Image (cartoon, rainbow, N blue to C red):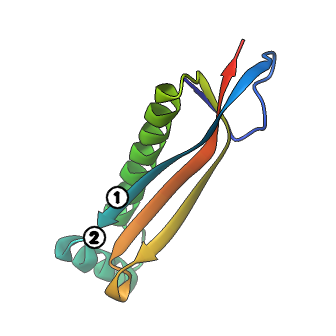
Amino acid sequence: MIVTTTSGVEGRRIISYKGIVFGEVVAGVNFVKDFAAGLSNIFGGRSGSYENELIEARITSLRELEDRAAALGANAVVGVKIDYETLGQGGNMLMVTASGTAVYVE
């Protein structure tokens, strides 16, 4: 599956448009990660626990996007965009949404 942020796939012609597809992930952040991130805020540096959570959520949302595109008979997704939002009381939930247009390319 070709996944790209561009509106097409260089060197290939889009044969058919299958529809808009999404991959969504909502992940909770637990107390241990919050505590470790708080220490990073106090002492400086990056929060590896939050970064890893973001990376995993992004990978999972893209995988879900690909699966949904494949179910429509697509072999590529163009115009991919990834959005991040915080949800819940105190922003303790992270939502990552990947969206794009499922297409069939030659």
- Disc 1 residue type (three-letter): Glu
Query: Measured from the top left, where is residue 63 in percent x and y?
Result: 43, 37
| 97 vs 106: above or below | below
Which three-letter amino acid code belongs to the residue tagged 2? Val
Helix, strand or loop for disc 2: loop
Q: For numbered disc 1, what is the local secondary structure?
A: helix
Q: Quadrant of the N terminus?
A: top right
Q: Position of residue 38 (x, y in %)?
A: 31, 82
Residue drawn at (36%, 49%), measured in percent from left and top?
56
Say which quadrant the C terminus sits in. Answer: top right
Kindly identify which residue carries mark 2. Answer: 29
Along the line of sight, the residue nearer the viewer: 81 or 70: 70
Disc 2/disc 1 C-alpha distance (Å) = 8 Å
Q: Which mark is residue 53?
A: 1
- 31 relative to 18 in the view: left or right: left
Picture quarter containing residue 8?
Answer: top right
The percent position of residue 84, horizontal first and vertical second, equals 52, 65
Sequence-wise, the earlier of marks 2 and 1 is 2
Residue 10 placed where, x, y %? 80, 22
Task: Please tell me how many numbered marks the rendered image carries.
Answer: 2
Circles 2, 1 touching at the beta carbon (< 8 Å): yes
